[in-house]
Amino acid sequence: MKLLILLFLISNYTLGNERIISTAPSITEMLGFFNEQYSVAAVSTYCKKPKRLCKKEKIGSMITLDLEKVIALKPTVVMALKLNNTSEINKLKKIKIKVLELSFNSLDDIKKSFQTMGNYLGKKEKVKEFIKDLENELHLMPIPFRAESFAIVIGAELSHGKISSVTLAGKNTYFSDIISFPGHINIFEKTAMTYPNLSLEQLIKKNPERIWVIQEKIKRETKKAWINLKYLQAVKNKKIKFITGHHAVIPGPSTITLAKEIRESF
């Protein structure tokens, strides 16, 4: 009897109150942080964590949104990434579906997104907890005797076993914000693009003193190709670091874990 009453209450909470649709892994992980497993109606196809939420109905993503399924689920809110291409968001707004837009480019964006979601869910204390933990981790970063130039690689192309081009994180990214917090300088801070793609020759010309390769997965041959670039001072001086894992590329609650790993890699 007690079990039936509990299931009834959960059903009422899910169907009668919030019915949230998440359109991105970062958003789903934030909803997990806020313990919203019962109010989430559907998630992005690309969600991996937390598993209890990623078992929910799938609606594609903001690029490949299944609009008919979204309408059928009758959401109280769709939580979406703030993108330059707003066509899908405009479609939702046109049919009177509430959209909560969130951004994750910089550390400030991440903090603001936590505040926006936390305010919506009525969980301001959880927001304070996240921001406090993130700030504490950043302030533990070692202060350098002098600022060193660095590059953050989030992707690399190989040709015949050698690196031919790289995708980098520019100045206005949370990757760069974390590493530059103690005073280091992103060597590509003046690049107009957020994630510029450069040839290996262009990277060699800049010759950063430190390199972080941050990706979800790094193949053994790719890592070997990096280690072989002895003419890069970061490699020569053993100041190239590799950080991998799902948490390394999904901004949100796991940004604290990424900051900790970067700190420990100095």
Image (cartoon, helix red, strand yellow):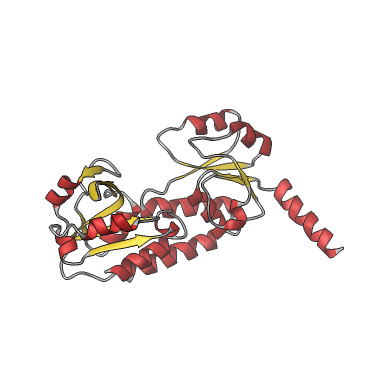
Describe residue 68's horizontal placement relative to residue 9 as left or right.
left
177 or 57, nearer to the observer: 57
Q: Residue at x 54, y 63 (%)?
A: 125
Left or right? Give the position of 18 relative to 60.
Answer: right
The percent position of residue 62, horizontal first and vertical second, equals 50, 38
205 vs 184, nearest the viewer: 205
Residue farthest right in this picture:
1
Task: Examine the rendering and report whether any part of residue 36 can be seen.
Answer: no
| In this picture, residue 14 sits left or right of residue 211 | right
Which of the 4 image quarters holds residue 202?
A: top left
Q: Position of residue 108 (x, y in %)?
A: 37, 53
Q: Above or below — where is 48 with respect to 264? A: above
What's the residue at 19%, 52% (across, down)? 187
Q: Position of residue 22 (x, y in %)?
A: 56, 45
Q: Quadrant of the C terminus?
A: bottom left
Q: Nearer the viewer, residue 213 or 134?
A: 213
Residue at the location (43% across, 66% down)? 132
Specify whether residue 182 is in view. Answer: yes
Quadrant of the image occupied by residue 265 = bottom left
